[in-house]
């Protein structure tokens, strides 16, 4: 015990458990003539140093997994979290395989050291450390999104400042060059950040495979351990000789009082054990000849079989659809997925947000006079052609590039299946077999058709999100003249046509702005009331326009 007190390596302890088990079984054979209680006492002394480590298995496994997960994060450079988007995403993806290989290896360590009796501690350790790993990835993803938004905002501010502080051609050229460089960097960041969607799906698949492996490990351990402790006891050599003598002398007629008493006691014990098992009460379990010297069996029947009862209860929980082997990790995975979604969405729309920031204060909205009320004695506006302003054409250029950027999701789909297969076979033994079966059931990577569907969903989400942001920015315009309304209608029409070209349905708010923004003051009220009556107009947009143009709705 003193020599083992400082031992922390589960692999070494697993080897010790194997050697001690063999030694104990050999010793059990030598002690078959010894009374059962005394024999268990001797074997207990032999196994005592090992049982100390088994009792601390949960703590040891948690420490081992913590070190392995940190190594996976550190080797991939995730903990630093710095660098460009491509490097960060690559490090995130590179950490998945070693992290889950360590988790699968924990199943084999549990079987090697404890024979599966401490599978409950394994589940707790795996859940805790996997949750911590996913939290670290979530923090890295969130930091990536924050850095990108800050960089885009700074570039937009610098470009706007350069364009407004001086009217020189050199300054305008410098501002244009800076905007072009920012757009290139933005495109590179988007291509890299989109890979987070693949990382998220790979993580989700890896967690599902691990859950399947752990469920299989629990079911296998419970069935094996129940079988180990359920066999009837094997009589000793002296008991066998007594039974042979009884058979030779006419069975019970030649039996001694002690033999008869032992037979009755055994029958009573068997009956009481069956009755207690059916009622769920923990009772001492009888062990077979081989199991009498097995350290796992002795551990399970100790303390009136309470450990075995807890394992049986755990095994029964597997049939409950509400039971989760990794509740904390599943919750953390959902949080990670939500962070990935918000980060990718934010990065894709960061440039749109920056371009829309100055929109409410543009001078074009108040050109041609005060807010668009009745002209009174002022001459009507002359006819003129309007063109979309640069802010909306820049947004259009950005959104038109999104389909091409989303093609990164459809590339290298053939490499996904080998990656999942490699992670499934990284462990050894029972854990590897279960992982390989789970990977086969999962079907490997996602098909190209599935990724095309994902890309289409993201295109719709991004363009619709940009439309919502545009509508909100327009509603913040403080005042709108008639001429400014015509300009706004032109801009909105450009955006609506852009959405149609991208096969995304325009929202009612933008269609309402397109219809009413440039309406003549004397026609605005009638048009607005008619659109509202038909049910195709957005009431909030109508009220916002009326307020901007200082026009009554009645």
Image: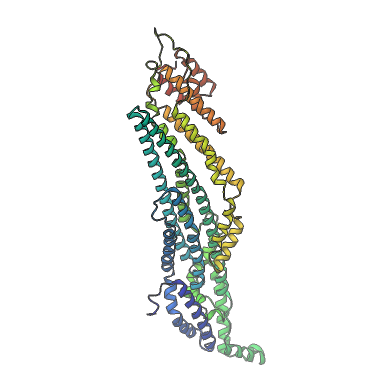
Image vertical order of residue 253 relative to residue 170, above or below? below
Q: Residue at x 44, y 20 (%)?
A: 485
Image vertical order of residue 484 relative to residue 13, above or below? above
Which quadrant holds the C terminus? Answer: top left
Say which quarter of the image contains residue 419: bottom right
Q: Nearer the viewer, residue 40 or 505?
A: 505
**Residue 253 visible to an observer of this rendering:** no
Q: Residue at x 58, y 89 (%)?
A: 237
Residue 165 placement, left or right of 335: left
Which quadrant holds the N terminus? Answer: bottom left
Q: Nearer the viewer, residue 483 or 259?
A: 483
Q: Residue at x 52, y 38 (%)?
A: 402
Q: Residue furthest left?
A: 165
Q: Residue at x 45, y 33 (%)?
A: 469
Residue 90 placement, left or right of 6: right
Residue 337 percent coordinates (x, y): 48, 48
Residue 19 percent coordinates (x, y): 50, 80
Residue 234 percent coordinates (x, y): 58, 82
């Amino acid at each position: 015990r003193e020599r083992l007190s400082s031992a922390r390596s589960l692999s070494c302890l697993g080897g010790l458990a194997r050697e001690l088990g063999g030694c104990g079984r050999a010793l059990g054979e030598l002690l078959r003539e010894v009374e059962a209680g005394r024999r268990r006492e001797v074997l207990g002394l032999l196994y005592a140093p090992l049982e100390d480590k088994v009792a601390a298995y949960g703590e040891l496994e948690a420490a081992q997994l913590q070190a392995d997960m940190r190594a996976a994060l550190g080797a991939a450079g995730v903990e630093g979290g710095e660098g460009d988007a491509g490097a960060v995403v690559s490090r995130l993806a590179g950490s998945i395989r070693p992290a889950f290989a360590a988790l699968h290896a924990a199943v084999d360590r549990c079987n090697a050291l404890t024979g599966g009796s401490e599978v409950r501690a394994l589940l707790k350790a795996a859940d805790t450390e996997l949750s911590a790993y996913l939290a670290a990835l979530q923090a890295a993803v969130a930091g990536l999104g924050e850095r990108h938004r800050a960089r885009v905002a700074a570039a937009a501010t610098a470009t706007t400042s350069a364009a407004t502080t001086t009217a020189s051609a050199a300054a305008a050229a410098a501002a244009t060059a800076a905007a072009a460089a920012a757009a290139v960097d933005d495109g590179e960041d988007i291509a890299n950040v989109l890979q987070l969607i693949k990382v998220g799906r790979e993580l989700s698949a890896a967690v599902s495979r691990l859950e399947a492996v752990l469920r299989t490990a629990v079911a296998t351990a419970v069935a094996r351990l129940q079988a180990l402790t359920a066999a009837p006891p094997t009589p000793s050599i002296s008991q066998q000789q007594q039974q042979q003598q009884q058979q030779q002398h006419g069975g019970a007629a030649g039996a001694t009082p002690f033999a008869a008493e032992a037979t009755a006691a055994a029958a009573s014990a068997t009956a009481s054990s069956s009755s207690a098992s059916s009622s769920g009460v923990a009772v001492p379990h009888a062990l077979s000849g081989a199991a009498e010297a097995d350290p796992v069996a002795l551990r399970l029947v100790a303390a009136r079989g309470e450990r075995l009862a807890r394992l049986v209860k755990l095994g029964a929980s597997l049939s409950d659809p509400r039971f989760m082997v990794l509740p904390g990790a599943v919750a953390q995975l959902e949080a990670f997925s939500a962070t990935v979604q918000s980060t990718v969405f934010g990065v894709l729309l960061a440039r749109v947000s920056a371009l829309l920031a100055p929109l409410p204060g543009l001078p074009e909205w108040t050109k041609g006079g005060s807010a668009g009320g009745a002209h009174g004695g002022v001459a009507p506006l002359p006819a003129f052609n309007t063109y979309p302003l640069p802010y909306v054409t820049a947004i259009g250029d950005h959104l038109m590039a999104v389909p091409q950027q989303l093609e990164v999701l459809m590339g290298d789909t053939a490499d996904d299946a080998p990656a999942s297969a490699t992670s499934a076979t990284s462990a050894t033994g029972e854990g590897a077999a279960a992982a390989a079966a789970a990977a086969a059931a999962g079907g490997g990577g996602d098909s190209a058709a599935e990724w095309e569907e994902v890309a289409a969903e993201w295109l719709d989400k991004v363009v619709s999100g940009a439309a919502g942001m545009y509508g909100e920015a327009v509603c913040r315009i403080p005042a709108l003249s008639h001429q400014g309304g015509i300009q706004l209608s032109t801009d909105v029409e450009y955006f609506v046509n852009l959405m149609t070209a991208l096969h995304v349905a325009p929202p009612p708010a933008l269609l309402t702005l397109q219809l009413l923004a440039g309406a003549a003051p004397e026609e605005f009220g009638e048009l607005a009331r008619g659109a509202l009556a038909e049910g195709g107009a957005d009431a909030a947009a109508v009220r916002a326009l009326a307020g901007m143009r200082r026009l009554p709705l009645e």
